[in-house]
Image: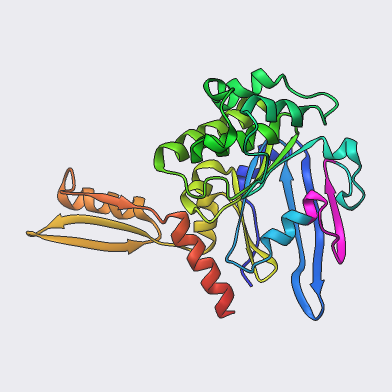
Amino acid sequence: MVEVRAGDACEALRENGCAVSVRTLKMRYGDIDVLRGFDLDVYRGEVLALLGPNGAGKSTTIEILEGFRIRSSGDVSVLGIDPGRGDDDWRSRIGIVMQSWRDHARWQVSELIRHIAAYYPNPRNPDDVLDLVGLSDQARQESRKLSGGQRRRLDVALGIVGRPELLFLDEPTTGFDPAARRAFHALVERLRVEEGITVLLTTHDLSEAEQLADRIAVLSHGEIIALGTARELARQVQAEAEVRWSENGGARRELTGDPSRLVWDLHCRFGGPVPDLEVRRPSLEDTYLRLVYQQEAA
């Protein structure tokens, strides 16, 4: 088992209190333990990415937190309420952006947002929501005629129109082109910084998790096997950086856990700038694959 720990980067977030608190969460289907008793906190105002291979238990976890599935055992609090007993008032405080969303395709964008807003006690102004997600120009357009990126922004609009304190994003940029993905990332960052919304993100796009998330939790075989920032996770598994340079007419390459020391040694050896110096620190993908491999080998 890989040790689960979170470093100093969590301290400022922890002071905000928890939007989500999970203790010894278990889920069993027949004789199969899908969730095996893990703990997890999501702090108010943070973006936490939940990663894991297919079958790790991500969807089950999210459905329990959203109140759509009853857990086998464990304590769960979402915005101070057990989601298994969440009422309409509690549900109005969360927003959900599913991986796929079915709606009335012929509805105009603004009509659909106004329709959903009517279900909330204190919704945002639909026109303000359109502006926030960048769909003001498409307000009178039928939702079925939106591009993929616009469709996803509409999903977010529907998820935030009720002024949620907590937003669930399930594979939010699947099928996006690079420009649409970049625009969506900017939107999520704006919601976090300007609106103070807590975001729980599930994604298979590791670069997306690395860019958006304050912290990352890795779920494997129903257990949280790692938790922290991307850099903290890399230190946890002792992932090595790659240093490249040119010397004696050839390319050189070395893997090291202390790239700063190696670069300094090279600088001293060359007596100045190191030719073609390049330092590649371990990516989240490198770290993630190593974590999962270690779990599989344990």
The quarter holding residue 86 reads top right
Residue 38: horizontal and vertical position, in percent? Answer: 75, 63
Indicate the position of residue 200 as horizontal and vertical percent values. 67, 46
Q: Is 166 positioned to the left or the right of 266 in the image? A: right
Position of the N terminus by quadrant: bottom right
Q: Is residue 127 left or right of residue 251?
A: right
Quarter of the image with the C terminus is bottom right
Residue 297, horizontal then vertical, whole percent: 55, 79
- Looking at the image, the residue that sits furthest to the front is 106
Nearest to the observer: residue 202 or residue 7? 202
Using the rendered image of the protein, determine whether residue 197 is visible from the camera's viewpoint. Answer: no
Residue 138 visible within the image: yes
Q: Is residue 70 above or below residue 292?
A: above
Q: Position of residue 204 (x, y in %)?
A: 53, 56
Q: Nearer the viewer, residue 41 or 278?
A: 41
Front-most of residues 34 and 134 = 134
Foreground of the two, 91 or 249:
91
Going by the picture, which residue comes out furthest to the left?
249
Q: How is the image coloured?
A: rainbow
Residue 142 falls inside the magenta stretch: no
Please state the total of marks drawn on the protein image.
0
> What's drawn in magenta, residue-wise?
64-79
| Image height of 40 relative to 189, above or below | below
Q: Residue at the location (62% across, 35% down)?
A: 106
Determine whether 62 is above or below 12 in the image.
below
- Residue at (66%, 46%) from the top-left corner? 102
Q: Is residue 205 left or right of residue 86?
A: left
Q: Is 75 situated left or right of 171 in this image?
A: right
